Image (tube, grey):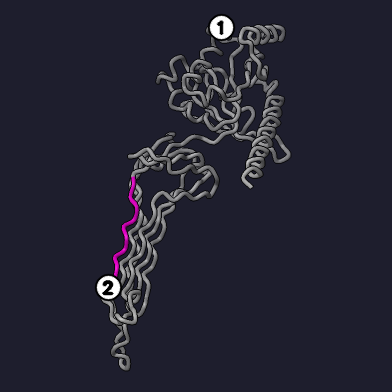
Amino acid sequence: MKFVDEAAVRVVAGNGGNGCLSFLREKYRPNGGPDGGDGGDGGSVYLIGNSGLNTLADFRLKRLFKARTGESGAGRDRFGKKGADLKINVPLGTIISDAETGEFIGDVTREGEALMVAQGGRRGLGNANFKTSTNRAPRKTTSGKPGDERLIKLELKVLADVGLLGLPNAGKSTLLSAVSHARPKIADYPFTTLHPQLGVVDIGHASSFVIADIPGLIEGAAEGVGLGTRFLKHLKRTRILLHMVDCAPIDGKDVYESVREIEREICDFGESLGNRERWLVLNKIDSVPAGDADQITRDLVDRLDWQGPVYKISAVTREGCATLTNDIMDRLNMIQEELQTIEENKGEQTQ
């Protein structure tokens, strides 16, 4: 299935049903009075979070979604049936905005979460509502209100705890397949990953996290070169970035320059990504002698003046991968505890 992370669709809520003009006429009650019932409310349009979806491809062909109109009221005080709501499944991580005004509408991030994007029209009132002591035979009714209609933009930003950064062929896809059940395409040529790949890393004891691999970045990605510029936005929701570096690139490229190249691209993309917590992961240590890998790591840390965590791994042999994933889980738990403390403090301040 083709990966689609943006779509524009028109959503139309149902109109409200009209109120009824009616008077009761029975054999022994020739002047029974007004009995026109109200119409039904129009159906609304909702977007529903569905973890089984990971792309907006379903919206490539169908671009118009309409909810049901409410039925009109009837005599004998019978109300019209409410129009059925329209529920549309979208992937978790979908951001919704008004395509014409740019107004932010909402964000669907949880399984089963419902976001109303178009409200159904209110029902019209039948003449029974307008009976008074001075007007016993009202002929007044109201029509149903039209439902909302709007063009909305859907933008998918994948939900992952950890994001993988790096040049093409840094081994990101190999790491994803080594630590999760994801099976991304792996080959020895650039851009084998053409769209974001997600994998769940199971640590055990009911602990797990989601890791995302995006297409490799090249110089100028933030300005539109290559594939990375389109998918960098998918890393905005991550809490940790793993900056993967090939410690022995076959093209002889300087490892230090490889790191700086990616740093420039994520900083050019925006502060929110440039300031994200980032870990340095030197991959493919199996391709160099152990002493050389240690020396490459020391030299790189010194030249970068790197202050964050540093790991040496081999995604192929899985050397060092368990330590890396366990430390990630510990750090994510710590971040979650910090966020909970912040929320609790906010709650105490508002009381």
**Callout 1 secondary element:** loop
- Foreground of the two, 173 or 223: 223
The answer for how far apart the CA atoms under marks 1 and 2 are is 82 Å
Q: Earlier in the sequence, mark 1 or mark 2?
A: 2
Residues in magenta?
A: 140-150
x and y percentages locating residue 247 in the rendered image: 61, 11
Q: Quadrant of residue 71?
A: bottom left
Q: Overall secondary structure of the magenta stretch?
A: loop
Where disc 2 sits, the SS reads loop
Residue 176 x, y percent position in the rendering = 59, 28
**Which quadrant holds the N terminus?**
top left
Q: Count residues near mark 2 (Cα–Cα under 10 Å), then give few for <14, some for 14-19, many for 20+.
A: some
Mark 2 lies on residue: 140
Q: Amino acid at mark 1?
A: Asp
Seen from the viewer's position, the closer of residues 152 and 217 is: 152
Of marks 1 and 2, the one in the foreground: 2
Disc on res. 254: 1
Identify which amino acid the numbered label 2 is placed on. Lys
Residue 190 appears in view? no
